[in-house]
Image: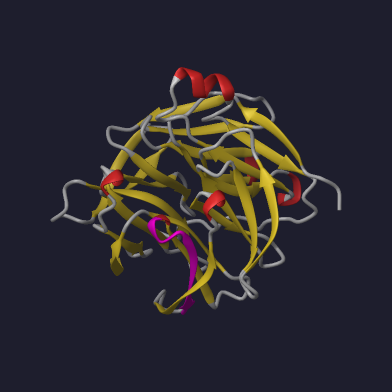
Amino acid sequence: MASPRVECVVKERSEIGEGPVWEEKESILLYVDVCGRRVSRWNSATNQIQSLTTEKFVGCVVPRTSGGYIVCEGRRFAALDWEKRSLTTIAEVDSDKVNNRFNDGKVDPAGRFFAGTMLLDWEQGRRDGSLYSLHPDNKVVKHFDNVGISNGLDWSLDHRVFYYIDSLNYMVEAFDYNKQTGSISNRRSVYKLEKEEGVPDGMTIDNEGKLWVACFDGGRVLRIDPQTGARVQTVKLPAQKITSVCFGGKDYSDLYVTSASLGLDDQELAKQPEAGCIFRVTGLGVKGLPPNSFAG
């Protein structure tokens, strides 16, 4: 098997780059900088970056079938009109937990937007977060609470399994998933990270049903077989704080990897000057799937 090639493609440094989504029509990578409070679009053809600033921390952004995007900013789901550069609140969550914020999120195969929350001061290690889904009729469903840091999520190729990461559990978990109702049940562990692998963060699935997990403080991405619970591949990156992954590019054969620079001092940044940048991994020999768009 040919060894993968890692290249730094988005050289603008994010504090916490997160939530990459490939927009096939314009060959654009959509992503956020959580603490930098920015939603950005990187055009892979022109290498131009367009950004929009948010008022609060922004956890993730997804495309919307009717145009524009849905953003998780602070504790709200909001509609983003890119042309007008405006955000409109759709729904707010965790009203009794004002020190919470949204983190990672993704759209399910039926067009619902799943996203979870966490404590702003996450280093306290408290489990104040919850997992929610925004339905196309703008109804919000709370799936469960007692979440430390709500992170990566995706669905199996047959849409029967929902994969999920609460970073404070140091594992990838699975649930039975009902595509008709959006309900999840029967929680179980799929893969427990080893110490040197760091903290599980963002996640995506490939066209063979294997999971790609970003490892914060691990400087790598793991490829996991959720059927056997085995790690089948490790891709090392030139940055330690790896945050999330998505497939994109021609035929979805490139893996885009976001990273963070927050908390690194000058000495550490000198050792990893590309921390906070976005990498493209080619030559993996597998492809991803087009992202789902919010159906509302």
**Image point (26%, 43%), residue name:** 120
In the image, 272 versus 155, the foreground residue is 272
Q: Is residue 219 visible?
A: yes
175 part of magenta stretch: yes
Q: Residue furthest bottom?
A: 186
Q: Give above or below for 87 relative to 9.
A: below
Indicate the position of residue 96 as horizontal and vertical percent values: 13, 56
Q: Give above or below for 88 relative to 13.
A: below
**Image point (86%, 48%), residue name:** 2
Indicate the position of residue 12 as horizontal and vertical percent values: 54, 23
Indicate the position of residue 176 as horizontal and vertical percent values: 48, 79
In the image, 237 versus 8, the foreground residue is 237
Residue bounds of the magenta highlight: 168-179
270 part of magenta stretch: no
Residue 222 falls in image quadrant:
bottom right
Quarter of the figure with the C terminus: bottom left
Q: How is the image coloured?
A: secondary structure
Residue 8 falls in image quadrant:
top right
Q: Is residue 117 left or right of residue 159?
A: left
Q: What count of labels does the image hold?
A: 0
Q: Is residue 138 visible?
A: no
Q: Is residue 94 left or right of residue 258?
A: left
Q: Give above or below for 110 relative to 275.
A: below
Q: Is residue 186 left or right of residue 284?
A: left
Residue 15 falls in image quadrant:
top left
Q: Residue furthest right?
A: 1
